[in-house]
Image: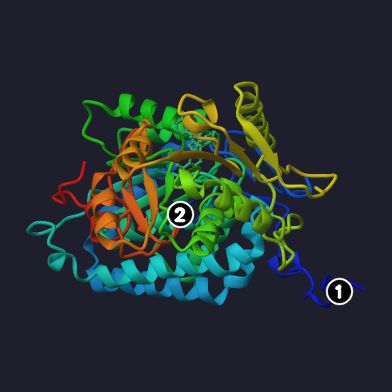
């Protein structure tokens, strides 16, 4: 008998009451899309979850018209306090159904239930509570006189934090008085569709939130190009973000883009090494590394490099990879076959370019998409694994001798989303943080999120900020953010 025999049973998907088929949610009604349908599968088992109807451009048109009508006739006429009440209601309903949402997200995305239960879903509720509180206080947000909504917000989100990315976008948009058309990612539509039920349960007026699953090149493009959309908020790859910026250049549609990253976790030799090791692991192995702000580059001071890497590999050997619904699982499945192929290809390139590869010695299930935690050492700044966003559980280790060298190496990337610094020396912490071109810099921690804190990128990581009052500004006509 092993200690696992005493572990609680895995979460059951029976609590979900899954429907065999999901339509689009437009104007407060479930409706069928003209873009065919896809079968959503669990990446951990490859078993089918449900059939999902896909939107085509005429469905996007219907959704935008519904959002416009509800904006003109209902939502823009409501007081902030009334809008806030709906947001509070949504937040409470998410709390009530938190377990269901956690199981659904784990099933659809492949990430461990411990993460969805303790991080994703609680943060979703926190985001709605936070912005519910803003809805009647826009005048005090310091964002200019008579803040007014933009109108219809088109929102396109990725698959790595499906419901959380929805919350980051929907909550501030509604609080500021906009209506929404949201397109979830192809591989993770489930929790967005369950969120449509929450909107109905909360009594949200029809058309205020419309959820339209669809293919990026069809529904996503149609949403971006729709003349009735006043603002596009996009999170995803830099390539698609660039296309969106190009399409909307010179138009009146506002854009915010939250794109890729190649975050540096910088560990100085005076750091609390054991804590840093935990932070490095959280930085790159949380959510299988499917995190735009992941600390995918470890920059470690040369004299402690061996100690840190040794401790890292020892600690990783204690992590459990497997069934994401098992409460003891630390590392879940990669989200899709395509993403697994991308990660595999980049890791092979890293090896071919001469970096030394270490892979966690662990079993992987026979079905599903799995990638063992991997660390590259002997990495130079020109190696692909040090440059490209991998978006998987792959850490590249580089060393430095001085703080200046650490700063130069950390900034040596086209991205600028995140960084972490580990040192006990407060003045060094401040000086290094100030020199990094990164939207967020964590001090002696990593991957902490809070609805009051702005989040966003420099350089090719995009522009605009989400979170706090900065996140509101992105949805207000005179908020100053483009
Ligand atoms: P993607 O950019 O293709 O997809 C993100 C979202 O954009 C999805 O909803 C998708 O349907 C939509 N989309 C795709 N093409 C579109 C288009 N032409 N117009 C409008 N919308 C479109 O990302 P992906 O292919 O799922 O992942 C590829 C890479 O992107 C990953 O390896 C990773 O590097 C990066 N990524 C980053 C984030 C992030 O949070 N910054 C999230 C997911 C993926």
| Residue 272 in the image: above or below residue 251 | below
In depth, the one of 92 and 107 nearer the eye is 107
Is 402 situated above or below 170? above
Q: Which is nearer the N-term, disc 2 or disc 1?
A: 1
Which residue position holds label 2? 166
Badge number at residue 312? none
Q: Which of the 4 quarters of the picture holds residue 241?
A: top left
- In the image, residue 380 sits, relative to residue 139, either above or below, namely above
Residue 375 point in image, percent of width and height: 62, 41
Q: Quadrant of residue 378?
A: top right
Q: Position of residue 416 (x, y in %)?
A: 34, 39
Quadrant in the picture for the C terminus: top left
Q: Count residues near mark 2 (Cα–Cα under 10 Å), then give few for <14, some for 14-19, many for 20+.
A: many
Residue 5 - label: 1
Quarter of the picture holding the N terminus: bottom right
Farthest residue toward the front?
Answer: 303
Tell me where residue 423 appears, x and y as whole percent: 37, 59
> Circle 2 sits in a helix, a strand or a loop, which is it?
helix
Question: Is there CB contact under 8 Å for labels 2 and 1?
Answer: no
């Amino acid at each position: 008998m092993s200690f696992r025999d005493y572990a609680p049973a895995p979460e059951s998907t029976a609590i979900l009451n899954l429907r065999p088929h999901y339509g689009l949610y437009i104007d407060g009604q479930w409706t069928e899309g003209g873009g065919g349908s896809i079968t959503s599968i669990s990446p951990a088992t490859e078993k089918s979850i449900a059939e999902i109807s896909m939107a085509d451009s005429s469905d996007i048109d219907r959704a935008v018209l519904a959002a416009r009508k509800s904006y003109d006739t209902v939502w823009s006429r409501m007081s902030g306090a009334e809008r806030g009440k709906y947001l509070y209601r949504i937040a409470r309903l998410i709390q009530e159904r938190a377990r269901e949402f956690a199981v659904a997200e784990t099933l659809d995305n492949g990430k461990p239930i411990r993460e969805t239960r303790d991080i994703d879903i609680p943060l979703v509720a926190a985001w709605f509570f936070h912005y519910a509180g803003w809805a009647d206080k826009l005048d005090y947000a310091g964002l200019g006189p008579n803040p007014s909504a933009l109108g219809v917000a088109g929102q396109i989100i990725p698959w790595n934090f499906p419901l959380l990315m929805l919350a980051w976008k929907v909550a501030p948009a509604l609080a500021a008085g906009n209506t929404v058309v949201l397109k979830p990612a192809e591989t993770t539509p489930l929790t967005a569709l369950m969120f449509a039920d929450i909107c109905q349960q909360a009594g949200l007026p029809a058309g205020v939130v419309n959820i339209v699953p669809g293919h990026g090149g069809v529904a996503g493009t149609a949403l971006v190009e729709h003349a009735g959309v006043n603002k596009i908020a996009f999170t995803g790859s830099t390539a698609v973000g660039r296309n969106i910026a190009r399409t909307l250049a010179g138009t009146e549609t506002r854009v915010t883009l939250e794109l890729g990253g190649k975050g540096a976790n910088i560990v100085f030799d005076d750091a609390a090494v054991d804590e840093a090791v935990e932070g490095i692991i959280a930085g790159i192995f949380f959510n299988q590394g499917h995190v735009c702000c992941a600390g995918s580059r470890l920059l470690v001071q040369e004299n402690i490099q061996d100690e840190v890497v040794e401790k890292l590999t020892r600690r990783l050997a204690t992590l459990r990879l497997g069934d994401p619904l098992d409460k003891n699982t630390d590392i879940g499945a990669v989200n899709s076959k395509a993403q697994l192929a991308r990660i595999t290809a980049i890791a092979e390139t890293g090896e071919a370019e001469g970096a030394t590869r270490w892979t966690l010695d662990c079993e992987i299930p026979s079905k599903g998409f799995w990638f063992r935690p991997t660390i590259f050492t002997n990495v130079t700044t020109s190696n692909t694994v040090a440059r490209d966003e991998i978006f998987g559980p792959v850490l590249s280790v580089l060393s430095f001798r001085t703080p200046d060298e650490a700063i130069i190496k950390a900034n040596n990337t086209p991205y600028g989303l995140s960084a972490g610094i580990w040192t006990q020396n407060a003045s060094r912490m401040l000086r290094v943080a100030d020199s990094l071109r990164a939207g967020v810099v964590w001090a002696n921690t990593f991957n902490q999120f809070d609805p009051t804190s702005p989040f966003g990128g420099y350089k090719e990581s995009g522009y605009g900020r989400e979170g706090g009052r900065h996140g509101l500004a992105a949805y207000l006509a005179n908020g100053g953010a483009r």
